[in-house]
Amino acid sequence: ARASAATKTVSADDELRGMMVPPEALRSRFGRTSNGYGSHYFIGPSAISVQRGEGWYKNTMVSFNSATYGLTEHLSVHAGIDLVSLVSSRSNGPLWTTRLQVSGTISDAVHLGAMATYLRVPLPRTAGDQVESGTSGGFGAGLVMITIGDPDHQLTIAGGLPYDGSDRALGPLLYVAGATRLFPNVSLVTEHWLLADPNTTFSMHSLGARIIGHHLAIDLGVAYDELYAVKVTPIGTPFVSATLNF
């Protein structure tokens, strides 16, 4: 009889545990969700690794589509293409990019990485230049990076050398980005790129907010540069992105 009572008690306990909602699920449903978007900013990555078999797909302003996938615990691949440029730049080809990245965690707050990336874009190098038919621009770059922090609060600094296929060496490419979680499901994100070459110096800056969900995040921001973004509004080009984790 005692054994039977004990068995019933254990069964009741198991049933109660099965009815309980895990704490992480409660946080996702009613409050602060875990941040699965710490591996990237608006465009560039952090040194926080994308786990093997995981990744994300991002759509920016409907036209630009990109995705990242973790091949191993430390190696990931990224690619993106702009759909509008497939039609508007038929003679010069579309805007597309690709990236291979290796990264790893040194401690809970220090992450190191390196990446090789290529961007193909049919844009003039200066405000007065024009893109000639049958030509296209593009350059590759190798960068090393360090990220200090965690997915919720982080700063990434990266630097490297670009190469555009010409005989002339380009100046260094610098990249600084950061994110901080201001509210349970909202982060402030900023990203800055600088090509510090005397003949083709170019910088791009962006600032915005990321609304964090368990599988979906929405980015709302403004991108600014002195050549192109200011043609949309004086403060730059507003953008909206949706990121889906998988």
Image (cartoon, grey):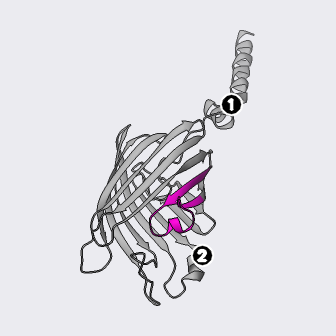
Locate the N terminus and report the quarter of the image it occupies. top right
Q: Position of residue 84 (x, y in %)?
A: 60, 76
Does residue 146 appear in this view? yes
Crowd band around label 2 with a 10 angstrom C-alpha radius: few (<14), some (14–19), many (20+): few
User: Is label 2 in contact with label 1 (beta carbons under 8 Å)?
Assistant: no
Query: Dot 1: what SS?
Result: loop
Q: Residue at x 74, y 15 (%)?
A: 4
Q: Residue at x 60, y 55 (%)?
A: 244
Report the residue marked by disc 1.
Answer: 21
Crowd band around label 1 with a 10 angstrom C-alpha radius: few (<14), some (14–19), many (20+): few
The stretch in magenta equals 216-239
Q: Residue furthest top?
A: 2
Q: Residue at x 59, y 55 (%)?
A: 243
Choose between 21 and 209: the one closer to the eye.
Answer: 209
Report the residue marked by disc 2.
Answer: 84
Locate the C terminus and report the quarter of the image it occupies. bottom right
Does residue 51 appear in this view? no
Residue 241 occupies which quadrant of the picture? bottom right
Nearer-N-terminus badge (2/1): 1
Q: How many numbered badges does the structure rendering display?
A: 2
Residue 29 occupies which quadrant of the picture? top right
Q: Is residue 190 above or below residue 69?
A: above
146 relative to 246 in the view: left or right: left
Residue 224 among magenta residues: yes
The amino acid beneath tag 1 is Val
Q: Residue furthest front?
A: 234
Q: Position of residue 126 (x, y in %)?
A: 39, 75
Q: Give the number of the mark in front: 2 or 1.
A: 2
The amino acid beneath tag 2 is Val
Query: Dot 2: what SS?
Result: helix
Choose between 116 and 242: the one closer to the eye.
Answer: 242
For the residues labelled 2 and 1, the Cα–Cα distance comes to 45 Å
